[in-house]
Image: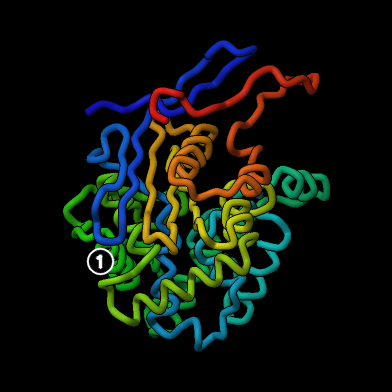
């Protein structure tokens, strides 16, 4: 099966570009509710795995031992923008552990938040490891490593016990041994597993409703639900589809982006998981596609849709401030 046309980009009402891809909606028992395109294709979920990669923080007892807050747990699940609130929380968390940013395996970068990046450059400063969108995840790994008395050195390598534990947790949720699939290296240096898109959908459904998992694992997942719902700004940042979806729906939709056109969502009340991949890796198309699926599932109220309008059908604005087009779901699959 080939990829399906999911999103169109228009200019003055005429389609200028098209984005193809695949998407799947699964329930917590692994059944496919709806699908579009080739859902058996192997994908790199990338950062979409972060909420599931934070489970070890709670299961291990590290979260309780270090009294992690909702904000810190949300940050552990995040692809944050490097806003000041993110930077300050990572700094204080590392300090509480007796660590510094030098312990983070991710590399130094400027914040993804443009305003913050400009502020730093204007003051003569450069980017650092804390600004990396994965620094919360890395701080979470260091927290668990400290609590379990595991080596901090090379904690990011696949052979490290903490990464092996992470692969076991992901495999449990996906319902398949991920070690059978190709493995890459992510932008932050951690392992980047692959899996069929359908398994990512199933993993998200089990994250939404962890029936059939161990009681300890289910409790950890529900704790992460609570943290993300209570502190949505820390999982992404101002103006992002992830933060705004989590905030507007009050946790009814727990969304998470992944690089190269990946976007996932867990719907706890319905026990559903959604996974989609835009074939060309486009970030501009993925939120439009996800929101179209959520609308099709009748998840969003009219008030929700009004608040999320800028993500449902984003406008294209030229350098003069004129609206010249829009990004919209393709009518063929709705």
Extreme-bottom residue of the structure? 65
Q: Residue 161, percent across and down?
A: 30, 73
Quadrant (top left/top right/bottom left/bottom right) for the C terminus: top left
Q: Is residue 273 visible?
A: yes
Q: Residue 244, percent across and down?
A: 63, 52
Image height of 143 relative to 239, above or below: below
| Residue 281 located left or right of residue 158 | right
Quadrant (top left/top right/bottom left/bottom right) for the N terminus: top left
Classify residue 160 by image quadrant: bottom left
Say which residue appears at 45% left-offset and 82% top-offset.
146
Q: Residue 57, percent across and down?
A: 44, 76
User: 206 and 140: which one is in front?
Assistant: 206
Circle 1 — which element? helix
User: 126 and 70: which one is in front?
Assistant: 70
| Residue 148 located left or right of residue 17 | left
Image height of 123 relative to 271, above or below: above
User: 29 and 257: which one is in front?
Assistant: 29
Say which residue appears at 62% left-offset and 70% top-offset.
71
Q: Label 1, on which residue? A: 172
Crowdedness near tag 1: few (<14), some (14–19) or many (≥20) residues, C-alpha within 10 Å? some
Image height of 263 relative to 246, above or below: above
Q: Residue 8, percent across and down?
A: 50, 22
Extreme-right residue of the structure? 123
- State the colouring used for the structure image: rainbow
Q: Is residue 145 visible?
A: no
Q: How many marks?
A: 1
Say which residue appears at 33% left-offset and 67% top-offset.
166
């Amino acid at each position: 099966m080939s990829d399906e046309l999911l999103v169109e980009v228009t200019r003055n009402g005429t389609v200028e570009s098209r984005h193809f891809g695949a998407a799947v909606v699964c329930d917590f028992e692994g059944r496919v509710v709806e699908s579009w395109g080739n859902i058996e294709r192997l994908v790199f979920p990338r950062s979409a795995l972060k909420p599931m990669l934070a489970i070890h923080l709670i299961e291990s007892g590290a979260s309780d031992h270090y009294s992690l807050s909702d904000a810190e747990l949300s940050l552990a699940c995040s692809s944050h923008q490097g806003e000041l609130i993110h930077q300050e929380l990572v700094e204080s968390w590392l300090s509480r552990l007796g660590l510094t940013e030098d312990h983070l395996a991710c590399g130094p970068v400027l914040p993804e938040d443009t305003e913050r990046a400009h502020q730093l450059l204007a003051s003569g400063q450069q980017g650092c490891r804390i600004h990396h969108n994965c620094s919360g995840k890395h701080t979470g790994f260091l927290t668990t490593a400290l609590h379990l008395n595991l080596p901090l050195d090379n904690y990011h390598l696949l052979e490290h016990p903490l990464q092996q534990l992470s692969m076991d947790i992901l495999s449990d949720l996906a319902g398949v041994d991920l070690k059978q699939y190709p493995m890459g290296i992510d932008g932050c240096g951690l392992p980047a597993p692959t899996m069929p898109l359908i398994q990512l959908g199933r993993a998200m459904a089990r994250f939404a409703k962890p029936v059939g998992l161990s009681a300890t694992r289910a409790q950890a997942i529900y704790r992460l639900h609570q943290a993300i719902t209570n502190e949505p700004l820390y999982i992404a940042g101002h103006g992002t589809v992830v933060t705004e979806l989590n905030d507007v729906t009050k946790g009814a939709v727990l969304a998470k982006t992944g690089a190269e056109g990946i976007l996932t969502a867990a719907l706890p009340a319905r026990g559903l998981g959604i996974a989609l991949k835009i074939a060309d890796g486009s970030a501009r198309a993925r939120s439009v596609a996800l929101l179209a699926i959520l609308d099709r599932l009748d998840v969003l109220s009219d008030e929700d849709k009004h608040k999320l309008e800028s993500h449902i059908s984003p406008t294209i604005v030229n350098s003069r401030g004129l609206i010249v087009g829009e990004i919209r779901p393709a009518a063929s699959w709705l």
